[in-house]
Image (tube, rainbow, N blue to C red):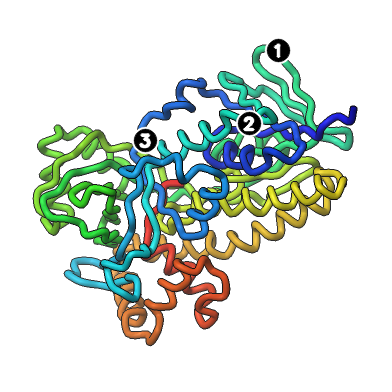
Amino acid sequence: MVKANRILIVGAGPAGLSMARALSGNGLDIQVFERASRESLASPPDDGREIALTHRSERLLRELGHWERLQAEEIGPLREALVLDGNARDGLRFQMPGGPGDVDPLGWLVPNAALRRVAFHALADRSDVTVHTDAVVTDMATDGQGASLALADGRRVQGDLLLAADTRFSSARRACGIAADHHDFAKVMLVGRVRHDEPHRGTAWEWFRYGQTLALLPLHDPHTASVVITVAPAEALALQALSPESLGEALCHRFDQRLGAMTPLGPLHAYPLVGVYPRRLVSERVALIGDAAVGMHPVTAHGYNFGLLGVATLSELLKDAQRRGRPIHDPRLLADYGRRHRRATRPLYLATRLVAGLYTDDRLPARALRKAGVAVATRLPGFASAVVKGLRDDDRGASARWPMTRQLIGGLLSNLSRG
């Protein structure tokens, strides 16, 4: 009997679990290692983050069998996006051709915890996938003979290919000798859900105010949204220390009472803003996926979507090699994945750093430049419709006139992701 090729996946977040599901049913032996408990994977705690999903990501989630496992109230359609700068009362708007009531939304907002839950349960009937929980990886190595993991309980596991999917601060990536560049934005992102008096009408806000960046993400309930506040660390701590009543008043004030009174539905969760990009995405018998491959600034809404894109790209290459009887660890295959994923992600990663820097710079020249940018985009013929078409058509030939600009602005101005 021929031994099945074994793939070792370090990290059971959405990327790692989605990769396991994408590869299942192709004659592979898939082993996933996660330091968290099985209970926390089966029923993840709420972490405050809402994930913005593009049409392509929605299709990929359907193919993986994840979408139908989501509950209706966990899916918030995004009908319109509004970008504001400074103290402006109106700004740049994006909506479907039929207006905010169009049946087909710009995208969807889904809790990160829900995506993690469905990704785990989608593996329940997969006999070729084993998820090892409470599994602490202490060492790993790869060479011409294979890949191996050493676990804290004394086990040593051998495989043919190692996939690192353990966050943007990946210890697996470091252990495999892959360096990464980190960019600390010196800000903290606070996220939490609120109930508000006025309906949000499915509109997402991206509001670059002076001294802070605000976002409001519409959830399934028309009177419930996720608020996102990006501020200096000290200010973030002060907000987290407020009582629920005082926090509601503070949020209402920051959003200029535009949705009426706000009532927090839970605590504000804090996340330091650090962008990470590895200098390589592959090595000998190693490939990086998810946040281990690209740690995006969340303002572009591409973190989770890039993670799913990497899963789709690499899984297709691996399944094709398996079907053809070729080595799944072939350096040419891995290099192909590295080139494709780098080409799809690197330009936007770098552009995001520039734009995030500009829109959080409160000096007078920066203020003038960004106001001019929004004004130009508002008046540019076909710009808004090109962005919308790009989001709807999933980047397949849409808006050839604005390929890079549409991708950047479409992500930046239409959604805010927590992946």
Could you say which quadrant of the image residue 80 lies in? bottom left
Q: Identify the residue under disc 3.
A: 47
Could you tell me if residue 188 is visible in this image? no
Query: Which disc is residue 126 wearing?
Result: 2
Amino acid type at circle 2 is Arg
Q: Earlier in the sequence, mark 2 or mark 3?
A: 3
Front one among 405 and 259: 259
x then y, percent, for residue 341: 65, 57
Residues at badges 1 and 3 in contact (C-beta under 8 Å)? no
Name the mark nearer the viewer: 2 or 3.
Answer: 2
Front one among 117 and 93: 117
Q: Is residue 362 left or right of residue 22?
A: left
Could you say which quadrant of the image residue 5 lies in? top right
x then y, percent, for residue 134: 56, 19
Name the residue at 67% across, 51% down: 279
Could you say which quadrant of the image residue 359 lies in? bottom left
Front one among 156 and 75: 75
**SS at mark 1?**
loop
Q: Earlier in the sequence, mark 2 or mark 1?
A: 2
Neighbour tally class for label 1: few under 14, some 14-19, many 20 plus, Cα within 10 Å = few
Quarter that holds the N terminus: top right
Amino acid type at circle 3 is Asp
Q: Identify the residue under disc 1.
A: 154
